[in-house]
Image: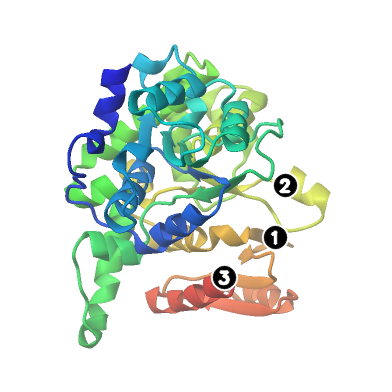
Amino acid sequence: MEQILYRYNPWWEDKFEAGDVIERPRIFEVLKANLTIKQVTILTGLRRVGKTTLMKQVIQHLIEKLKVDPKLIFYVSLDDYLLANNNILEIIEEYRKIHELDFSEKIYLFLDEVTYQKDFELQLKNIYDQQNTKVYASSSSASLLKSKKAFLTGRNVVIEVLPLDFEEYLQFKKIVVKKTDKHLLERYFEDFMQAGGMPEYVLTGNIEYLKELVDDIIQKDIAAFYGVKDVQILKDFFLLLMERSGKVCSINKIAKILDISPDSASRYLQMFADSYLIFLVPRFGKTNERILSAKKIYAADLGMRVYFTGFRDKGSLFENYVYLKIKKLNPRYVYQDGNEVDFLMENKTLIEVKYNSEMPKNQEKLFNAIEAKQKIVIKNIFDLEKLDELMEMK
């Protein structure tokens, strides 16, 4: 095991080499701030959305800025089959033996794909309670973080890592728009809606990467984990979800198209949500309306959606992007008498998205009738500044 651990932690022997990494300042600042708290910091999100890169940047910060001894920093990916026969506590004990570290000395642990380990919550609890550590962990599966066990209650902070937003996309593409050239933003934004925000795809432009990524998630995080034998059904199901992105999802219709039971369709839908490929938005209303009403679907990444459905319905893509921007505010959609308003947040802010268009009269009537502390109509990329102000108020 020692040789494996040295491969994961080259900074034990050599100078830290970050490579050509582009930072994501907003979320990186949150992760840096978490260095001062004891709670286990768990990064969640879509596979290859950048969780590992962010952890490596925190490691770089510890070594280069805070001058922490590199031997006190330990990184490992727990989905490595070479470590499958060892639990987290055994791996960390081996690490301590390698560097002769006693339990009083503070160490920094970075545990990638921690949910691959059986009883990971109990093991993290034991580390938290019994060792002098700061732990960062990651997971690409929401289902395993929804455990009914309460081992980590009060001991963890969960941070969701989303694909790049438009501002980060411009940064990754090294595009700088001067104030005198703001008219170019609309063209760049349409390029962004077509490409999406998966970091590696934005940098390489290799279109096959998105297909391979979705196939990888369906195979590893859904089919293998849940024991679904018919992988083609899952692929067909995902295509239907992308075609219905931004719309209310009818389980019965999808079941009929795929010739599966509604129960199976409902289970598959939740599997895709738990793998972070899609997000589900409930209807605003009383508890029974919220639970029983069909949910709206949004793609986790615009580029994936465009890959499977083509670059069309820009209004729906724009709405999808707005949802990703305000996701942390737990939006609900409003439906009444055949009319719909896109989002009502828990802070009572009402938002309707109309990309370069106007609301029909009946929808406008509903929009005006809904009680809200603040009402916002988003028509173009310049209106997105209103969302930035909204998120800052959170």
Residue lying furthest bottom: 180
| Residue 303: % across, % down | 33, 49
| Residue nearer the viewer, 228 or 42 | 42
How packed mark 1 is, by other alpha carbons closer than 10 Å (few <14, some 14-19, many 20 or more), is: some
Q: Amino acid at mark 1?
A: Tyr
| Residue nearer the viewer, 59 or 276 | 59
How packed mark 2 is, by other alpha carbons closer than 10 Å (few <14, some 14-19, many 20 or more), is: some
- Per the model, the C-alpha gap separating discs 3 and 1 is 12 Å
Mark 2 residue element: loop
Q: Are marks 1 and 2 in contact (CB under 8 Å)?
A: yes
Q: Amino acid at mark 3?
A: Glu
Q: Is residue 326 above or below residue 376?
A: above
| Residue 256: % across, % down | 59, 28
Write down the residue under mark 3: 352
- Which tag is nearer the camera, tag 3 or tag 1? 3
Write down the residue under mark 2: 293
Q: Which comes before the other along the chain, label 3 or label 1?
A: 1
Q: Amino acid at mark 2?
A: Ser
Say whether residue 79 is visible.
Answer: no
- Per the model, the C-alpha gap separating discs 1 and 2 is 10 Å
Residue at 30 percent of width and 19 percent of height? 2
Q: Which comes before the other along the chain, label 1 or label 2?
A: 2
Residue at 59 percent of width and 35 percent of height? 145
Q: Which comes before the other along the chain, label 2 or label 3?
A: 2
132 displayed left or right of 187: right
Mark 3 residue element: strand
Q: Which mark is drawn over residue 335?
A: 1
Residue at 21 percent of width and 44 percent of height? 16
Mark 1 residue element: strand
